[in-house]
Image: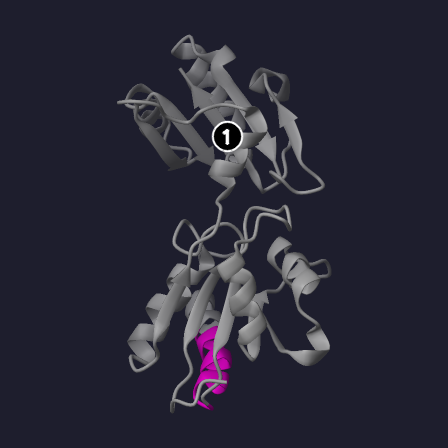
Amino acid sequence: MNTAAVGTLYGVGVGPGDPELITVKAYRMIQECEVVAYPKKRRGGKSYSHEIVELYVNPEEKEMLGLIFPMTKDPVVLEREWNKTVVACWEALSQGKDVAFVTEGDPNLYSTFIHLARLMKDLHPEVPIVSIPGISSVLGAAAALELPLADGDQQVGIIPATEDRAAMKRAIENHDTVVFIKVAKVLDLILDVLDELNLGDRASVITKVTSPYEMVWHNARELRGQELEYLSLMVVSK
């Protein structure tokens, strides 16, 4: 237990899905912290990070703190729900308890922990915040495809896939390898851009990488017109 007046907030990356892809340090932190916080789904099911952490700790011996992160762009709802999240963590931290917030992948790469840490700093600047790096889905995808992301002077881009066609085209043109994350909603648009650049055969797609539910398509064209899982990414390698 932390004997200081205020506990430490740890952002703990637990990997992309395979429970064995957790670091020794991440394991130690979730063992040592009195409170384990995790992303909680509103309706049933468990997040990967929740499933993973339950393999390594006994929930009956820990204070398990499920946090709901709103999937909306409504600023009013976002502010309300994020403030609830900070309040829940602060309740434990203010008692001198260390909190390990477990997150898929790495806590500083497109993670919910980024906003949580930022808001905590704003509202409670006295709280120490520490990040424990984790293996990201980007690296998990490279391993699953047996595809080097970059070698020598090559450049790699990690790009959130959007409906901005021009931006997506520039990303492909300006990098030797591009990993498009959250590609499900704009898959056909990206495929159109790739065909325009004569790179349609250079793209692969993976859903739920490294998890027991992983699926791999080495030819992304096979997926045109289909619906993909939210946790899908595309790797384009020239």
Per the rendered image, the range of residues in magenta is: 83-95
In the image, farthest residue toward the top: 198
Q: Is residue 142 left or right of residue 127?
A: right
Q: Position of residue 139 (x, y in %)?
A: 48, 37
- Residue at 53% x, 76% y: name it: 33
Q: Provide the residue designation for mark 1.
A: 142
Q: Is residue 94 magenta?
A: yes
Q: Is residue 215 magenta?
A: no
Q: In the picture, residue 7 is in which quadrant?
A: bottom left
Circle 1: residue type: Ala
Question: Callout 1: 10 Å neighbours few (<14), some, many (20+)?
Answer: some
Q: Is residue 27 left or right of residue 236?
A: right
- Residue at 72% x, 58% y: name it: 45
Residue 147 in view of the camera: yes
Query: What secondary structure is marked by label 1?
Result: helix
Majority secondary structure in the magenta region:
helix
Residue 226 in view of the camera: no
Q: Is residue 19 left or right of residue 121?
A: right
The correct choice, above or below, for 81 with respect to 20 in the image is below
Q: Position of residue 152 (x, y in %)?
A: 29, 22
| Image quadrant where one finds the C terminus | top left
The correct choice, above or below, for 33 with respect to 46 in the image is below
Q: Position of residue 210 (x, y in %)?
A: 62, 39
Q: Position of residue 38 (x, y in %)?
A: 57, 66
Q: In the picture, residue 54 is in which quadrant?
A: bottom right
